[in-house]
C-alpha cells in the first residue's frame, strides 16, 4: 500500500513538474505606460513596472535577470531587475538621445516639428551580453547607440544615415546585426564584433522587423505589401519573397527550433504561420488588433500581443493553429520578450 501511494505521489509530482513554468512573458503596454511580467501557464500578472511613457521594445538577458525596455517618447531606456519584481535599476540616458528641434516636414510623413527627442527605440543585446544596441531613428544623423552593460556607460554611436528603422536583431550564428529601414526599403547589416556596417540589402515593402532560423536565414517582415522576405545570411541576398496574403502592420518571429515563422497583420486581423523549410504558408490564425508575436522556448506556443478589444496576450497552439487562451494584460500590449526562469 505504501509503495502504491508513493508511486502515485511521484506521478503527481512529475505531472506538476511538467506543468511548471520555465518562462514568463514580458509585455510592454502602450496606453497605460506599463511593463508587465506574465505567468505563461496561468496567465496571471506576477510583476509590473510603471514607466514615464509608452514602452516600445524590450530584450531580456540570457540569464533572465535583467530587462531592457525602450521608452522612446521619454528619451531613455529603462533597466529592470527581473529577480526583484521588475524593480528599476537605472535609466540609460545619453546626449545621443536628444537632437536639435526637428524642422517642419523634416521626416517622412511630416509631423513632430520642434521635437528634440532622437527617439531611442529598438534594442538588441550582443551574444555575450556585453553590449546593448539602441536605435535613434530621429537623430540628426540616425544610427545606433552602443551601451556597455558592464561599465554602465554609453560608449559610441554607429552612424547609419538612413531614417526610419524600428527594430533590430543579432544572428546568433554569425554575430551580424540586421536593421530593417522602414522608410528606405533597405536592411543594414552590421558586424557586432567591430560595430561596422558591412552591407546594405534592398528589401521591398517597408521592412520593419527581423528574426533568424538555425540554417542561416534572416526573415524580414514588411508592413506595406504583406510580404516576408528571406535573406541568406552568408551571401546577404534575398533568396525568397513570400506573399502572405495578410495586410497591415505587424512583426515577424521565428520559432526557436527553426520550424515556423509567424507574421502578424493588423488590417486583416490575423497571424500567418509559415513553414520555414518549404517557405509555404501553412495557415492563418484570426486575432483582432494584434502587434507583436513571440514563440515559446519549446516552439509549441505563440504569444501575440493584441490591442483589441481591451488589451491582452493571445496564446496560439502552433500545431493546431488556433487560439487556446487569451490573457488580459494592460490596455495595449505592443512589444514583448521571453524571460527564461529556469
Image: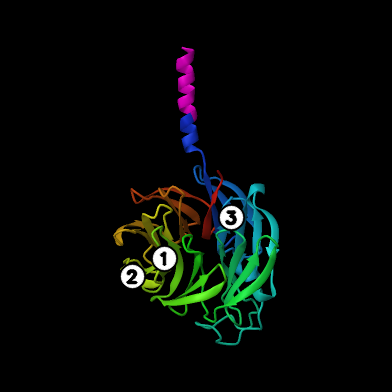
Q: Choose the circle earlier in sequence order: 1 or 2.
A: 1
Residue closer to the observer: 303 or 14 = 14
In the rendered image, which residue does mark 2 sit on?
239
Task: Name above or below for residue 197 compared with residue 305.
Answer: below
User: Where residue 59 sits: x, y (%)?
Assistant: 56, 59
For the point 56% across and 53% down, the residue is: 62
Give the residue drawn at x 32%, y 69%: 240
Which residue is nearer to you in this view: 330 or 28? 28
Q: Which residue, given by chain and number where applicable, does mark 1 sit on? A: 218
Q: Position of residue 324 (x, y in %)?
A: 40, 47
- Who is closer to the viewer here, 97 or 287? 97
Report helix, strand or loop for mark 1: strand
The foreground one among 312 and 190 is 190
Classify mark 2: residues with Cα within 10 Å, few (<14), some (14-19) or many (20+): few
Q: Which residues are magenta?
A: 1-13
- Residue pictured at 57% horizontal, 69% vertical: 121
Q: Which residue is mark 3?
A: 61
Residue 33 can be seen, yes or no: no
Q: Is 237 positioned to the left or the right of 60 in the image?
A: left
Alpha carbons under labels 3 and 2: distance apart: 32 Å
Quarter of image, res 207: bottom left
Helix, strand or loop under label 3: loop
Amino acid at each position: 500500500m505504501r509503495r502504491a501511494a508513493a508511486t502515485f505521489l511521484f506521478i503527481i509530482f512529475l505531472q506538476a513538474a511538467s506543468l511548471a513554468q520555465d518562462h514568463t512573458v514580458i509585455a510592454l503596454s502602450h496606453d497605460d505606460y506599463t511593463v508587465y511580467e506574465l505567468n505563461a501557464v496561468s496567465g496571471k500578472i506576477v510583476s509590473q513596472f510603471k514607466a514615464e511613457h509608452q514602452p516600445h521594445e524590450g530584450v531580456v538577458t540570457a540569464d533572465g535577470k535583467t530587462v531592457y525596455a525602450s521608452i522612446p517618447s521619454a528619451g531613455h531606456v529603462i533597466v529592470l531587475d527581473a529577480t526583484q519584481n521588475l524593480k528599476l535599476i537605472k535609466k540609460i540616458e545619453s546626449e545621443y538621445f536628444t537632437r536639435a528641434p526637428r524642422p517642419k516636414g523634416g521626416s517622412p510623413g511630416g509631423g513632430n516639428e520642434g521635437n528634440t527627442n532622437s527617439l531611442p527605440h529598438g534594442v538588441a543585446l550582443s551574444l555575450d551580453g556585453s553590449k546593448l544596441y539602441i536605435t535613434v531613428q530621429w537623430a540628426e544623423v540616425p544610427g545606433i547607440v552602443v551601451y556597455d552593460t558592464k561599465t554602465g556607460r554609453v560608449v559610441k554611436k554607429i552612424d547609419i544615415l538612413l531614417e526610419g528603422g524600428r527594430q533590430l536583431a543579432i544572428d546568433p550564428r554569425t554575430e551580424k546585426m540586421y536593421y530593417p529601414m522602414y522608410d528606405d526599403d533597405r536592411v543594414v547589416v552590421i558586424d557586432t564584433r567591430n560595430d561596422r556596417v558591412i552591407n546594405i540589402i534592398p528589401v521591398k515593402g517597408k521592412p520593419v522587423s527581423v528574426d533568424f532560423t538555425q540554417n542561416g536565414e534572416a526573415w524580414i517582415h514588411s508592413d506595406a505589401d504583406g510580404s516576408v522576405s528571406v535573406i541568406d545570411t552568408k551571401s546577404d541576398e534575398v533568396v525568397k519573397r513570400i506573399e502572405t496574403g495578410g495586410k497591415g502592420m505587424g512583426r515577424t518571429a521565428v520559432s526557436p527550433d527553426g520550424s515556423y515563422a509567424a507574421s502578424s497583420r493588423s488590417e486583416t486581423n490575423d497571424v500567418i504561420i509559415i513553414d520555414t523549410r518549404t517557405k509555404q504558408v501553412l495557415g492563418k490564425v484570426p486575432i483582432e488588433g494584434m502587434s507583436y508575436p513571440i514563440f515559446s522556448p519549446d516552439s509549441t506556443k505563440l504569444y501575440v500581443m493584441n490591442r483589441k478589444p481591451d488589451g491582452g496576450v493571445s496564446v496560439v497552439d502552433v500545431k493546431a493553429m488556433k487560439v487556446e487562451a487569451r490573457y488580459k494584460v494592460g490596455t495595449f500590449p505592443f512589444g514583448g520578450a521571453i524571460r527564461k526562469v529556469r
